[in-house]
Image (cartoon, helix red, strand yellow):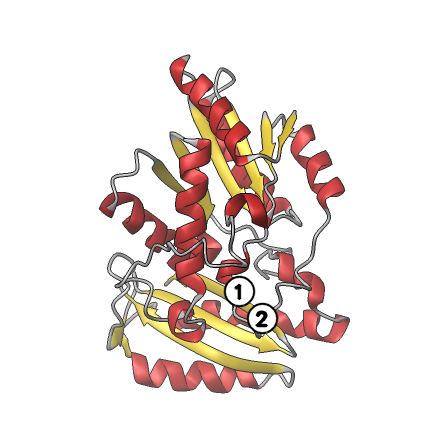
Amino acid sequence: MQIVSSSAAMQRLARKWQRAGTHIGFVPTMGYLHAGHLSLVQRARLVVGKAGKVVASIYVNPTQFAPTEDLAKYPRDLKRDLKSLRELGVDVVFTPSDGEMYPHQAGSGYSTYIVEENLSQSMEGAARPTHFRGVTTVVAKLFNLVLPDVAVFGQKDFQQAAVIKRMVADLNFPVRIIVAPTLRERDGLAMSSRNKYLDPEQRAQAVILYHALQAARMAVTKQSISAERLHADLKEFITAAPLARLDYVSFFDPETLEPVKQVAAGTQMALAVFFGKTRLIDNAQL
């Protein structure tokens, strides 16, 4: 396994593979890898095959964090991450610095960002107004450096995957986007690097996100229900967990991300809940 930290070196290597006709699979991450991340790597390998190359990036992207968010505290363990990726047979791990990804950011030299103006406005975009600008910008830059044929993202970040798919389509990136299923802990909590922040009591109550998704599924099993009523029911259900503070619950069309007034089987649901300063998200098709 090769570790590359230089943007120029990563691009040179990717171009070499392209010229040889080698398929490239890519999994962008912010590190502190868990089984969910590793399942994305395995999916990338499955798609490109033994003859292809699999690249994983580890980069905590500062532009997708607001000043009040947890950039400085975001969990990092590069040594452990590299060991996990080596065991999976990853070919290259790209570990750029901020200076490599955003040259001259401290001064006035970096000023170009990519903004998706439709799918990114609701839910996470409304709760974190600068978030998706940072996501689309860094993913576009990574695509230009790694030159992947296919990139794999997780369904836990459903809106993020939708925004990236739209960016790829709108800007003609020659990349196929695969969205892989959410991996969960045994009690249903979606795997997340931020789960590390939870104390034992918070962790026990955090499963309320999964239970809320299940409750919503049950509610629409036989008939549709108004979004307003289901929102009220789920708010009461979630906040019955003493440590939970609801950020949002949304019901929307899974293709357009447009909110719906009537929730039925096939509607997508997403929610965000705080436990102390830790903010967890989840989603499911009902």
State the residue position of label 2: 69
The secondary element bearing badge 1 is classed as: loop
Quadrant for the N terminus in the image: top right
Quadrant of res 250: bottom left
What amino acid does circle 1 point to? Phe
Quadrant of res 192: bottom right
Q: Residues within 10 Å of mark 2 (few under 14, many from 20)?
A: some
Does 108 sit above or below residue 278? above
Q: Nearer the viewer, residue 199 or 22?
A: 22
Say whether residue 220 is visible. Answer: no
Does 259 sit above or below residue 113? below
Q: Which mark is residue 45?
A: none
Whole-percent x and y of residue 129?
41, 71
| x 46%, y 68%: residue | 213
Q: Is residue 42 left or right of residue 178?
A: right
- Toward the front, the furthest residue is 108
Quadrant for the C terminus in the image: bottom left
Q: Residues within 10 Å of mark 1 (few under 14, many from 20)?
A: some
Say whether residue 37 is visible. Answer: yes
The secondary element bearing badge 2 is classed as: loop
The reply to whether dot 1 and dot 2 touch (C-beta < 8 Å) is: yes
State the residue position of label 1: 65
